[in-house]
Image: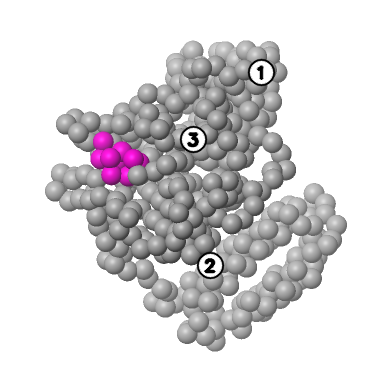
Amino acid sequence: MGKSPQVNREVWLKDIEDLIANLEMLFEYSEVNIVAFKKIIKKFQKYIEHGNVSNVWTVIKAYRFFSNSELDQVLLAKAKKELRKSVPEMALTPTEALPVADQGNVPTVTKLDLDALPGGQISKLWLAVYEDGTGSLIRIPVIVAKGVKYGPTVGMTAALHGNELNGIPLIHRLFREINPQQLHGVLVAATVTNVPGYVRNQRGFSDGTDLNRIMPGKANGSSPQVYAYNLMERLIKKFDYLLDIHTASAGRVNSLYARADMINPKTKKMAILQNPQIIVHNTSPDGSLRGAAMSNDIPAITVEIGDPSKFQKRFVKNALLGVTNILCHLNMIPNEVDQPEYDPVVCSRSYWIFASKGGVLTVQPEIYTWVRKGEMIAQLHSLFGDLVETYYAPEDGVVVGKSVNPVCESGSRIIHLGVVEDSFAKEAHDGHL
Ligand SMILES: [Zn+2]
């Protein structure tokens, strides 16, 4: 990076971050051709050498309006990849100059006393809920933005399934954008709700138990039940509204969708404001966090953002817009509700289609596409290559999620099919929480 100034490293990193974000916007939303893009990159690299990125965006903006072709798209994608390769390396050396957060400064608490926290500020806390076999506290990372004016308390929980991670960058971005000085009410977010699962890169608790099936837990119960109980008592019950953020499970992919009770006017409104690709009417099942919250009169929806064990920027960006919509609607932030370009597909019910036999599975339709009754949706082959079974769509529907793991056992999931009908059933479950 040569002579780039050391003093302004933070500014420099922020510039780089903004620049990448802007380049991505450019790539996704505006029409440039590759010649222009090459020029941009050339200039960009020149600026990098001189340690001044802030001017680059001005240069890029000048090239906004060009024609677009499929070939350009491919080349653009390549250029973007190259850019990604080069930028972080330059930005991250030398490492000793990077700002390091002092995690020791984040206090540990055993109860979340929102009244005691300062207004007009963002507070970071470790909320202790459990002790592990070493007697160490297991602590949930909680971020609180407390406004100076009265308003509701909205809670967000991510990674209740420890490998479902897209909620983490969503929360980070939201808190970067929130101005607590202008906020009405309180925004509380747990970036990782199932800490023992998260550190093991797994969905379930330390013993594998699915926490989203044993809510609200038990004070005198098994380890996961105690964890669930303390989670409910110390965190969830503080909320007036809950957004529980998930992704698909391992071996599957999801659209951006919300599950909500579409008969309850509050959760219906939340789901529509969340503006996902698909909304699935689903009365909160027993044992789920959403169900436990609803039983405590806390309107709750589940937001399913894409796939497990990864961060998916585009889904996160869209989901963030939805969260902002909800906060606007509750008059917590001053912006206006963003009118979506497309309305979500609202499914009155949904269900999984399961494989009956074992072998290797290929699922045909992509997520968020329509299938017609009788359309082939998957084929199962034996390990010798013989076709064992073909699966067809039992009715018209939209693909909410699907399996991408070829290894298929009897009872493995194939497709999560959403069905659009005129009315919503009082009880609706899809066998997936
Ligand atoms: Zn989940």
Instruction: Give the residue number, with chain letter if any, for mark 2.
Output: 88
Q: Nearer the viewer, mark 1 or mark 2?
A: 1
Q: In the figure, is residue 343 to the left or right of 391? A: right
Inspect this view and state whether residue 388 appears. yes
Q: Quadrant of the C terminus?
A: top left
Residue 14 on the magenta segment: no
Which residue is rendered at x = 72% and y = 43% of the image?
341
Q: Are marks 1 and 2 in contact (CB under 8 Å)?
A: no
Above or below: residue 14 compared with residue 403 = below
Residue 107, percent from left and from top: 27, 61
Q: Point out the stretch of residues depicted in magenta.
A: 229-237
Left or right: 166 with respect to 76?
A: left
Q: Check disc 3 and report the residue beneath it.
A: 301
Residue type at tag 2 = Pro
The answer to which image quadrant residue 230 occupies is top left
* Element marked by disc 1: loop
Mark 1–mark 2 Cα distance, whole angstroms, equals: 50 Å
Total labels drawn? 3
Q: What residue appears at the point 44 percent right and 16 percent down from the top-left corner?
A: 410
- Residue for badge 1: 422
Q: Position of residue 339 (x, y in %)?
A: 69, 45
Checking the image for residue 10, the label placed there is none
Q: Quadrant for residue 306, please give it.
A: top right
Q: In the rendered image of this protein, does residue 12 appear above or below residue 75?
A: below
* Mark 3 vs 2: CB contact within 8 A: no
Query: Left or right of 30: which side holds 46?
Result: left
Q: Label 3 vs label 2: CA separation?
A: 36 Å
Determine the residue positioned at 45% across, 41% down. Answer: 241
Task: Provide residue 324's location: percent of width, then percent of height.
Answer: 56, 50
Question: Residue type at mark 3?
Answer: Ile
Find the residue positioned furthest to the right. 67
